[in-house]
Amino acid sequence: MDYAALHLMADDHIKAALQEDMNQGDISTAAVMPHPQAGDVQLICKQDGVIAGLQIFQRVFTILDPATSFQMNVEDGDEVTAGQLLGTITGDVRVLLSGERTALNYLQRMSGIATYTRRVAKALEGSGTTLVDTRKTTPGMRLFEKEAVRIGGGVNHRYNLSDGVMLKDNHIAAAGGITPAVAAAKKVAPFVRKIEVECETLDMVKEAVEAGADIIMLDNMTHDQMKEAVALIAGRAETECSGNITAENAASIADVGVDFVSSGALTHSAGILDLSLKNLRVL
């Protein structure tokens, strides 16, 4: 998704992050640089990975000063290596200093997610199974984390609770079973919204198919159980498997035959990519 489509929502989050970091100004920068002064600083990669979030990184500085300029040597989605010069930022030194941590926080977090997502996606290459994320995101960071998944090679599942119907164990318990839960959802949800049902057993899978679910999630099933479930569904619904899917075990489910694999680890377990702003010069 292009940043132009994100900026209205993204700007609110970025401004809140800047306010959090300097709610009464940047005392350190004010002490060493009390007046406007041109300068530049280099963005250096310190770890191999996939870069993601460059437009967000840049936007932090242009919110502080629209005159800030960038000479970037890479694009989102590029694989980068330790020691690589990723770009140079030029502008008021005060802006470069004050925006540094917030900008890097976004870029490091998004790049870490993209790097991890790329590993999982590669493990599923050639299987015909699509890797998707979940709603297990950091509060206030979902917009950025889901974009990072996309840049890394994954696909976004529903963005939030308004995007689609997913009937999980507690929804099913509240409704009194899968059949009444699906029937109730069909009465309320617009016809353009798919209905997904989370199933933990083959008996639940059978009931979900008969109830008319559009997508059936195979939750924490064994490899053999998932293969049996896919055969039982026989194309009558789309299939998704979920439950502790990581970069280490994703390849082991590549032959199951599900349409989608969802992994919360893409966002809740990915680390950061180590990046740094170095070699600041006063011009």
Image: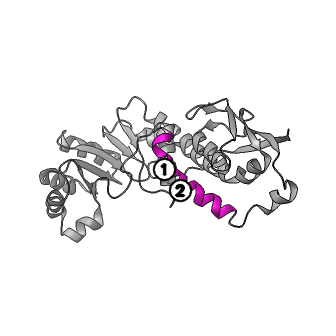
Which amino acid type corresponds to the residue marked 2 in the rendered image?
A: Asp
Which element type, helix, strand or loop, lies under badge 1?
helix
Q: Residue at x 52, y 37 (%)?
A: 118
Residue 266 visible in rendering: no
Position of 71 relative to 227 (above/below):
above
Question: In the image shown, does 31 or 37 lie closer to the viewer?
Answer: 37
Q: How are the residues colored?
A: one colour
Q: Is residue 13 magenta?
A: yes
Quadrant of the snapshot with the N terminus: top left
Which element type, helix, strand or loop, lies under badge 2?
helix
Q: Position of residue 261 (x, y in %)?
A: 37, 44
Q: Position of residue 218 (x, y in %)?
A: 30, 51
Q: Position of residue 95 (x, y in %)?
A: 74, 49
Q: Position of residue 181 (x, y in %)?
A: 18, 63
Q: Which mark is residue 8?
A: 1
Quadrant of the snapshot with the C terminus: top right
Q: Which mark is residue 22?
A: none
Q: Is residue 194 left or right of residue 146?
A: left
Which amino acid type corresponds to the residue marked 1 in the rendered image?
A: Leu
The residue that disc 2 covers is 12
- Tags 2 and 1 touching, CB below 8 Å: yes
Instruction: Determine the CA span between mark 2 and mark 1.
Output: 7 Å
Q: Is residue 236 left or right of residue 18?
A: left
Q: Residue at x 38, y 37 (%)?
A: 254
How packed mark 1 is, by other alpha carbons closer than 10 Å (few <14, some 14-19, many 20 or more), is: few
Q: Residue at x 33, y 52 (%)?
A: 221
Residue 253 falls in image quadrant: top left
Segment tinted magenta in the rendering: 3-22
Q: Is residue 118 magenta?
A: no
Residue 111 visible in rendering: yes
Q: Main secondary structure of the magenta part?
A: helix
